[in-house]
Amino acid sequence: MLIGEFSRRTGLGISTIRFYIRKGLLAPEAGQSGGRNPYAQFTERDVQIAAMIRFSQSLGMSLKEISSVKDEMQQAGISRERTVELMDLQLQVIELKAKDLRVMADYLRTKRDWIAAGKPGDEPTLACDALSR
């Protein structure tokens, strides 16, 4: 598939796709069309890689970290132990984010109730030390 269809399938902008190609995160094949500058041909595997990149970014991984994992996979393959280690690290990140979201939701709920009740007593505050930073 060409870059336009790949963009529609993945939800990535064309400039983002080209950026990922320059960074080596995506490596589409050179197609037969396009003359001296052959069109990039993307595969279903590229769609899956793009989904992995977006998912990894949503977990807080940097593109450098994603690229490192991708390189590790391509060079020697990732062992079961290394895969578990990477998953454990990401689970820690998700669990910290979930904790922070619970703290924020509790604060917003408490403040909303305080406002709805006519602001009786002291204003609720967000305990910054409750956030995992």
Image (cartoon, rainbow, N blue to C red):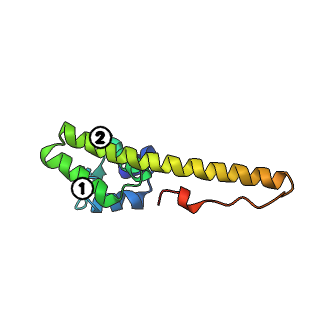
Label 2, secondary structure: give it. Answer: helix
Residue type, numbered disc 2: Arg
Q: Name the residue under label 1.
A: 68
Residue type, numbered disc 1: Ser
Q: With respect to residue 128, does 81 lie above or below?
A: above
Label 1, secondary structure: give it. Answer: helix
Left or right: 60 as drawn, with respect to 38: right
Residue shown at 37% from the left, 56% from the top? 17
Q: Mark 2 points at which residue?
A: 45
Residue shown at 70% from the left, 49% from the top? 109
Q: With respect to residue 80, does 28 lie above or below?
A: below
- The quadrant of the image that shows the N terminus is top left
Q: Nearer the viewer, residue 47 or 132?
A: 132
The percent position of residue 50, horizontal first and vertical second, equals 36, 48
Q: Which of marks 2 and 1 is nearer the N terminus?
A: 2
Q: What mark, if any, has residue 7 been given in the picture?
A: none
The percent position of residue 81, horizontal first and vertical second, equals 20, 39
Residue shown at 53% from the left, 52% from the top? 100
Left or right: 100 as drawn, with respect to 6: right
User: Quick one: which residue is furthest to the top in this view?
Assistant: 80
